[in-house]
Image: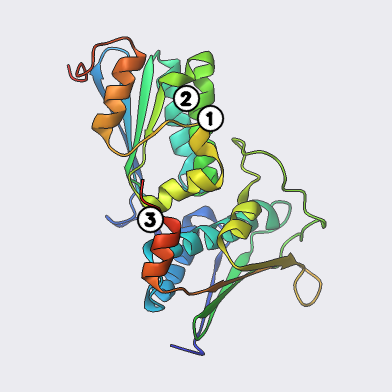
Amino acid sequence: MRDLDVTATDATDFRVEEECPRPGLVIVAVHGDLDLHSAGELGDRLVGVVDRGAASLVVDLSGVPFVDSQGLGALLRGTRRFGAGKEHFRLVVPAPEVRRLFELTALDQVFPLDRTRDEALAHAAVSDGLPRGTTNG
Amino acid sequence: MSGDAIRLRFPARPEYLLLARLAVAAVARRMALGRVEVGDLKLAVTEACSNAVRHAYAKGPPGEIALELLVDGDRLELVVEDRGAGIELPLREASPPSESGGMGLRLIQAVVDDFAIGPGEDGTGTTVRMTKHAEPAGAAARKREPEV
């Protein structure tokens, strides 16, 4: 019998998209549930982005309705890859139920959380020594 | 929907965790739980099932997870069972958050009202029992989402 692929629907399709709005800054936009099934893929992508020389990384979880401990582990892999430069790692987390997970685990003290991508980009610009508003191009 | 019981069996593989969440979310929403409380229950069931996926059948043939949702008035009991290798008690889950996980059971304890883990009734496998009492959605939201 053919296996049922329960992730093969629009509502639950997991995907990761990368954007590079200016040199050194990479935005990783995540879509879909972040759990044991998808955490490995995200962790690998984040490590790859850092290894390719990203100076600042914004991970946008606006399209993520659910995160579990495995998902947190993937995000930790990414931020730890930065080493001493981890202040250049920002997370966009608008959903209250997802933010709650960071609060429960005290990881809101580890990850700088923003509610919108614009907020994160403004903070990233400050971290990179750029004047506020220098978030595009 | 008092007295309702929903039972689900699925392969202990990561791609089926979503199925457990969908079932829990559907039942929790029918109990008029708030958005954060539904999220809490999805987290609890995912952590329990994920534990079974990662550990229960790691050293043997693939197996199944049984999920039971029992609704009794404003009380929802979630039971996650596997027939795998079993667990070592007492639990040692006090490790800090790490890349490899290890915080799943602590998260369950944080989001449900009652939690128990142990071997199945016949002494094999692992059974996780979690209970949540529904609160009016407005009250729960006020408690969990203070004004910033």
* Chain letter, disc 2 residue: A
Q: Are marks 2 and 3 on the same chain?
A: yes
Percent of width and height locating residue B60: 72, 56
Residue A1 is at least partly visible in this image: no
Quadrant where the image shows the C terminus of chain B: top left
Q: Do the residues bearing badges 2 and 1 touch, measured as CB atoms within 8 Å?
A: yes
**Dot in front, 3 or 1:** 1
Task: Name the residue that disc number 1 marks.
Answer: A77
Q: Which mark is residue A47?
A: 2
- Residue occupying the far bottom of the picture: B3
Q: Is residue B64 left or right of residue B3?
A: right
Residue A81 seen anywhere in this rendered image of the structure: yes
Placement of A72 over or under B147, stated as above or below? above
Q: CA distance from mark 2 to mark 1?
A: 7 Å
- Tag count in the figure? 3
Residue A7, which numbered label?
3
Q: Earlier in the sequence, mark 3 or mark 1?
A: 3
Chain letter of disc 3? A
Percent across and percent down for residue A112 are: 43, 30
Q: Amino acid at mark 3?
A: Thr
